[in-house]
Image (cartoon, coloured by chain):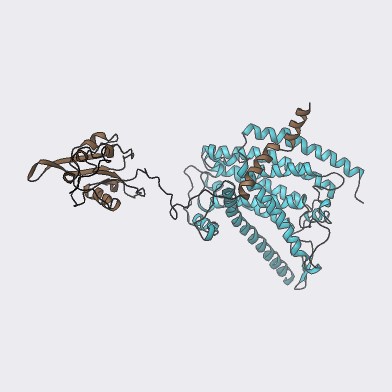
Amino acid sequence: MAELGLKLAFSVAQIAVVMGIVMLTVMFLTLAERKVLGWMQDRMGPMEVGPYGVLQPIADGLKLFFKEDIVPAGANKFLFSLAPILALVPALIGFAVIPFGPNQTVELFGRQFQPFVISDINIGILYILAFTSIGAYGIILGGWASNSKYSLLGGLRSAAQVISYELNVGLAIVGVLLLAGSLSLVKITEAQAGGFWHWYIFAFPFPQIFAFVVYVISAVAETNRVPFDLPEAESELVAGFFTEYSGMRFAFFFLAEYANMILVSCIAAALFLGGWNAPYPGTLLPENLAWVEGIVWFAAKVYFFLFLFFWLRATLPRLRYDQLMRFGWKVMLPIALGNILVTAIAAYLFPKG
Amino acid sequence: MRTKFTAWLKTIIFYEILIGMKATIKHLWHYRPITLQYPHEKRTLPDSYRGMLSLLRYDDGTEKCVGCDLCEAACPSRVIKVVSAEVPGEPTKRYAKEYYMDMTRCLFCGLCVDACPVDALGMTREYEWAVYDKRLLRLNKQQLLAIGDRSYPVREKRLELQHPNVAFFNVAFQHVPPKQT
């Protein structure tokens, strides 16, 4: 019993820490996005709340928290309330299998536990793919339950888009899985240790650079970000699937979008850019501090992707719907399939020693 | 053949998108915002700025307006309403007994200022006239005179004391030196 309690306490503590970090990152991202976007457009971004507007996320959060929670007339109340939760939970649940730092076990209170990954399950990446697909339900149900034409159109667009690009994400990942021979994110990351030429984007039998490009583009599309933000196209659909949402339910969708951004960035960093591994062999810091270096490298890679998201948003206009579909099915899909073929042949010819 | 290959190569490496991203990162790198934090810092207005309208006085404090209604006639938006009356005890002189401006309709064209034969109207450099109640923008004579008082501290002499030509066409003959008294 005490054993179980201790295990539970560890898990809860780990989950709390990871959730806290993710939420803080989301808060930081909302500010960073507006700032970076402003700077790229010769503006200043938020400047009023706090010095240089650094307290803006807190002000936004407080505002959203105290806003009236409106359920539109004719809405399906149950699904309307369920949708934001259904969008947020899958986005957060994926972080359970992300390895944030080196895979090492620490002995604490007579128990072995891994501090930098909540649970190292052997089908980690499959688990994430499965749950991010559920996130699409939140968007579709939210759009449908609102009883509004804009929401419904946004939800439908989102459904089509997420299905199309989810496929590309899955197929782009397959190349890496073939090379690593595992679905566990920890094992995949460990296989890329020892310098940037071991990262799967540059790895020896067949560099996964094409898969990487396909993955990044599909990830942008999957998180409904510019230039693939058709489900929430401001100029066409008011706000898309969350047009009718207000207060904390709107905040849930908002959190879900940013948590999804962080999640896909984490996956991209773990699968293609070697996760916590530094671009040079070994570590610079002494053995007992190596985990600091690992976490810093992981964070740097994740933030690079997040910056890329902002950068793309500042640069690109929105795609037309048929362009989106054509690009997904006629360009991305064949590249991903071809990548699988070539990678499979390469992995067969040069099996891991 | 070669150009076709270059075009293909440009397509697969997203050449145009990279050009665009270079442009945005250049602006991030050379960060020079053109934003003005408005309530804290304000633009310098041009000299010919046409702001809030006002009624003016002579240097002895009497109102310039003679109640001729020309501003009301000139106004394209029917902002101005003048109620003209004789000056008590002086049958040859008139003045504006009441003077209203509905600033919700004003488009700040300045035609009333041009139309005024005695320069009784002036455009100030005030522009922060946002109010919560629309009715507060219907100004009466006292309010307009107050705006003129705070915006034009230097006042002209009475018409009778100016050069006769200037007195008649106050605007057109400003280069004529005033009569020495």
Residue A229 image point, x, y percent? 61, 41
Q: Can residue A117 be spotted in the picture?
A: no
Residue A344, image x, y percentages: 86, 41
Foreground residue, A183 or A7?
A: A183
Near-viewer residue (A247 or A73): A247
In this picture, residue A347 sits left or right of residue A13? right
Color used for chain B?
Answer: brown
How many numbered circles does the render carry?
Answer: 0
**Observer able to see residue A303:** yes
From the viewer's perspective, is A243 left or right of A261? left
Instruction: State the image quarter where residue B1 is shown.
Output: top right
Q: Is residue A104 above or below residue A72?
A: below
Q: Is residue B23 above or below residue A284?
A: above
Residue A349 position in % (x across, y down): 92, 43
Residue A11 lies in quadrant: bottom right
The picture places residue A7, in percent across and down from the top left corner, at 73, 67
Q: Residue sitting at 51 percent across and 54 percent down?
A: A64
- Foreground residue, A228 or A94? A228
- Chain given the colour cyan: A
Q: Residue A220 sits in which quadrant?
A: top right
Residue drawn where x is 43% and y is 52% of the image: B42
Q: Image height check: is A41 above or below A92?
A: above
Given the current orientation, which residue lies at the most extreme top position? B1
Q: Residue at x 73, y 49 (%)?
A: A268
Q: Is residue A53 rendered to the left or right of residue B61?
A: right
